[in-house]
Image (cartoon, helix red, strand yellow):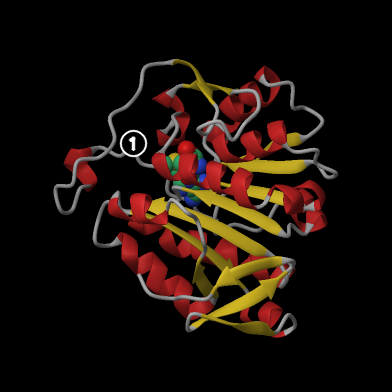
Amino acid sequence: MSSPPLSPLLDPVTISEDLIPLAVFKAIGVAHVDFDGALSQPLQLREDVRSGCGGQTWPAGMLLGKHMLRYHRDRLKSARILELGAGGGLVGLAVALECELQNQMLVTDQNEMLELMHHNVKLNGLETKAQAMVLNWGEPLPTAVLEQKPDIILAGECVYFEPAFPLLMATLKTLLELNPAAVVYFCFKKRRRADMHFVKMAKKAFLVEEIFDEDRPVFQRQGLFLFSFASRTGQQKTGKTGHSNGATRLAINGDSRIQSVSC
Ligand SMILES: C[S@@+](CC[C@H](N)C(=O)[O-])C[C@H]1O[C@@H](n2cnc3c(N)ncnc32)[C@H](O)[C@@H]1O
């Protein structure tokens, strides 16, 4: 099997399609992140972009972490959580730090990020709550993921490199086939027109919803998108619970979410 495309360095010269400036790299160091007070103690995160663009925190990861801690705390406790494209582990490790998890979560990325993920797990004393491992999109799922059958999948800032879109889609499809009741929490910042192609692909394959967040008006203006993806077959089992202001509300594993598929 050929190697997956490596995460690009987000070099504006090589990949910017419409001249929207991309993020500036941070210096190597340890960031202290508390998600605007959503964490009771800050997460310490070593940042080092020498291993790839995931070696620093990204806006969508910050938003997704805050959203999960604000709106899904109770559900996270008993969930089987998998993070994709974790970088240094921003989203997953924040959840692991704050929540009394009953199951060890899996924090995954490409091999280049493994050392940094391991480092950050240790730095926060999360060895019993989180395990770092390699999961390359588009490749067969690691045995640990097959056994885990994740029911919450976190993906922050994983839409930024068009050649990787089909690989990420393939992994999401496999995960939602493995557990049709799973929900993917998916957040990205639109930097290029092509980023919306990913949303189109997702809408063809999954039930895609823009989930409630009181900060939505603010982050939408910043080009940030926050969705949940679910399997259509998984949804048929849950059923509709009512209507509100013309928007259909669905009860999914205890969550009440507004069904909306426009972006
Ligand atoms: C922009 S970073 C986001 C990091 C972190 N989730 C955040 O929000 O701060 C995207 C991550 O996706 C990972 N990635 C890119 N292509 C991948 C692939 N084919 N398989 C697995 N991970 C991949 C990169 O290594 C990188 O860590």
Above or below, 247 relative to 65:
below
Is residue 242 found left or right of 226 in the rendered image? right
Residue at image coords 40%, 40%: 59
* Quarter of the image that includes the N terminus: bottom right
| Foreground pick, 207 / 6 | 207
Q: Secondary structure at mark 1?
A: loop
- Residue 86 image-quadrant placement: top right
Quadrant placement of the C terminus = bottom left
Which x, y percent locates residue 196? 33, 65
Q: Is mark 1 within 8 Å of ligand 1?
A: no
- The residue at the point 63 percent across, 21 percent down is 119
- When asked about the image quadrant of residue 45, the answer is top right
Q: Is residue 152 left or right of residue 263?
A: right
The image shows residue 245 at horizontal and vertical percentages of: 48, 80
Residue at the front extreme, as displayed: 245
Q: Is residue 159 visible?
A: no
In the image, taking residue 7 as reference, residue 93 lies left or right, namely right
In this rendering, the answer to whether 257 lies above or below 111 is: below
Report the residue that reaches farthest toward the top.
Answer: 29
For the point 75% across and 50% down, the residue is: 74
Q: Horizontally, is 230 left or right of 262 in the view?
A: right
Q: Position of residue 118 (x, y in %)?
A: 65, 26
Q: Three-letter amino acid code at disc 1?
A: Leu
Residue furthest left as drawn: 19
Residue bearing the label numbered 1: 9
Residue 30 x %, y %: 50, 16
Residue 84 shows in the view: yes
Which one is nearer the viewer's eye here, 24 or 240?
240
Q: Residue at 46%, 75% (x, y): give it.
A: 260
Question: Height in image: 207 above or below 183?
Answer: below
